Structure formats: structure tokens, C-alpha cells
Image: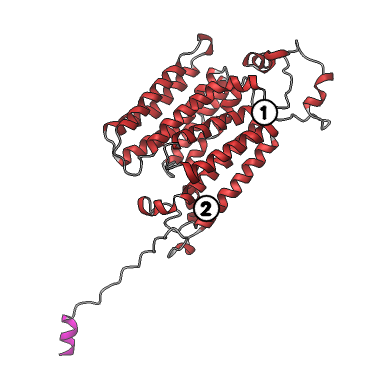
Amino acid sequence: MIRSLLRLAPPAPVRAPRPARPGNGQGHAGAVPGRGRRARLRDWAELLRVSALFTVPGDALAGAAAAGLRPNRGTAYAVGASLCLYEAGMALNDWADRAEDAVDRPHRPVPSGRISPTAALAAAGLLTAAGLTFAARAGRPALAAASALTATVWAYDLRLKHTPAAPAAMAAARALDLLLGATATMSAPTATKSGRTAADTAPSAPARGPALSGPDAHTPRGAAAARTGRTQPPTSGGSPVTLRAAAPAAAALAAHTYAVTAVSRHEAHGGSTRTPLAALGATTALGLLLARTRARAGIVPALSAAAYVRTAAVPCLHAALNPSAPLTQRAVGGGIRAMIPLQAALAARSGSAGTALTVLGLAPLARTLARKVSPT
């Protein structure tokens, strides 16, 4: 009898494993402490948007080219400073948005509890200090430019992001990043074998060609002469003449950044047709303007401009036709990746085809990594 009842009784229910509790934005998470090293690295890669890092070095390189200078040690310092400050902004952004992301993006590293808010804020502070240190190595003018960039980034993340001034603040940050590259390239001292700087030895050093002096020494024409064998007098600080030469490139980068930031304000919920349409018009017009170059500039500027329009404008068109959240996010991602061909076009227009091709080489890397880690 007992055996018959046992056969008729339903089997004991099998308990499903309890899912890990999501974080509450304060760093509490269920099974997070047991995550492996690879998973933690992926969490930080997601927080810092490492796939967008490839859009940063081109700012300094385009700034040096727009100023009519060849990349040097100061340019490398500017690239290091830009990378650190960009990542500081990413970490600070998620720390500042942790309450909002808990509702709209609970999968993000901070609201999900995979990275604590304290760790994100500490990372932002350390990366900011590292960026300013890199800039200081390039000279006081570069440190001044990096300080202005730092103030803009922190003001955007902590105060301006949810105000009408947000697109302008981001545009200013990108323009300052390009000017940082130009300033660092000009102001970085070049050490000689004896340990003295080029500025110290320049008066007694024999010139290989006619010396350049006056305003032409700091213009693109003067730099072109240096590339052809004529010497260019070293500088110990940023020249207003050279910075004015880099201003149009900074303005172009700022215009693109303004358009992308305006679209990004709708990426969580979508619903805007006018903003992607305006970004489409702005990026297309900018691409056509960049493609109009002198015949002797070669084909690199036109190719770079075409790649820029294709990367930035096509996703904006899709978002304008169907303003859903996924297509809006795709338009923002396309706008971020389009920074690379834009920087290449700006460098090529300044006569630095080699720098332009180097920057373009970063595009496949950014596209490949974007499939694994979202740039937005």
C-alpha cells in the first residue's frame, strides 16, 4: 500500500538556482564578489567604454597637423593625457548617473553592483590626476589646456549633462582636446644628447637651410618648410598664430560633437525625429566641406571625408526614419566612431597624409571592439 502511494505521489520540485540580486546603485550585489578576474576586467572595460578609446588619439594628431607641426614627444604626452581624461569622464559619468541608470540602464556596471560607486569615483580621480601629469610633462601651456579640458569634463558630468548646455559643453571638450594636441606639440622641449633642450642649443646650432623667423615660423607653411629640410625654431610655449591655425579644425570637431551629443540625449527612450535629422544635415554638410580640397592635397582628404559621412550620416538617417531607442543608440555609436575619419580628414586637409592614414588605421580596431563592448 505504501509503495503504491509513493508511486502516485508527485516528484519533489527541483529548485531553480536563485539569480544574483541586482545592485541598488550603492555597491551591494549578490554573487558579484565571486566573479573571476576576466569578468571583472570586462566590467571595467564596459564602464570605461574602451571601444571608444580609439577615437581619442586622433584629436592630438589632428591638432598637431592643423597647427602645421610634425608629431613629437609632446604629441605623445597629449595623447596620454587625452586618453586618461576621456576615461576619467566615462567613470565619472556612470558615478553621477547611478540613480538614473538604476531605472533606465540597470545592466550597467554601477547600478548592477558589478562595480561600486566608490570604485568608479576613485577611478575618475586617479585618471584625472594621471592625465594632468601627462600634460604637465609637455609644458605649462599644455597643462593649462588640459586643466581647461578637465574642468569642462567634470562640469559636464556633474552639472551640465541634463541642461540645455550639455551639447555645447561636450563640443568644447573635444575642441579643447584638439587644441591640447597642438599646444603640447609646440611647447614640449626636445632633449639633446647632452641633456640640454633644443631651445637652449638652438642659437648656436648650425642650420641646414635658411632660418625661418617672424610669423611664418609658426604657420603651416613654416612647418612644411621644416619637413622639407629647413629648420623650424623651437618654441617654449603656445603661439597664438599656430593656435589660430588649429582653430578651424577644432571648430569642425566641435560641430560634430555637438550634433552627436544632441542625439545622445534621446538614446534611452528614443522618440525624436528632428534631432537625428538635424545631425544628418550637419554631418553631411561637414563632410562635403572637408571633401573640397586643393588638387595637390591628394585623394586622402576626400576618402576620409567619405568615410566620415558614411559612418555618421547613415545611422542618423535610420534614426530619423524610425526614432526608436535602439536605432537612436546606433546613431550615437556611429557618431562616436565617425570621430576617427573626421580626425583623419582634418589632418589630411592640413597636408599630413601620413598622419591621416595612421588615424584611419584605428577605425577597424574601434569597429571590432565595439561588437564586444558598447561605446555608448
- Residue depicted at x 65% and y 33%: 142
Q: At x 48% / y 44%, what residue is drawn?
A: 159
Q: Residue at x 61, y 23 (%)?
A: 243
Question: Is residue 87 toward the left or the right of residue 325 in the image?
Answer: right
| Label 1, label 2: how far apart the Cα atoms are | 33 Å
Residue type at mark 2 is: Ala
Picture quadrant of residue 334 = top left
What sort of colour scheme is used for the picture?
Answer: secondary structure
Residue 153 higher or lower than 312, as above or below: below
Where on the picture, by quarter, is residue 74?
Answer: top right
Residue 114 in the image: above or below residue 362? below
Q: In the rendering, at what x and y percent does residue 155 appear?
A: 52, 42
Nearer the observer: mark 1 or 2; the answer is 2
| Residues shaded magenta | 1-8
> x, y percentage for residue 34?
48, 64
Q: Residue at x 62, y 38 (%)?
A: 147
Nearer to me, 245 or 331 = 245
Mark number displayed over residue 72 = 1
Numbered label attached to residue 120: 2
Few, some or many residues within 10 Å of mark 2 (<14, 14–19, 20+): many
| Closer to us: 138 or 3 | 138
Left or right: 270 in relation to 282 = left
User: Residue 3 colored magenta?
Assistant: yes
- Mark 1: few/some/many CA within 10 Å (<14, 14-19, 20+): some
SS state under label 1: loop
State the quadrant of the N terminus: bottom left
Q: Are marks 1 and 2 in contact (CB under 8 Å)?
A: no
Residue 86 can be seen in this image: yes
Q: Amino acid at mark 1?
A: Asn
Q: Please tell me how many numbered marks the rendered image carries.
A: 2
Does residue 49 appear in this view? no
Sequence order check, earlier mark of 1 and 2: 1
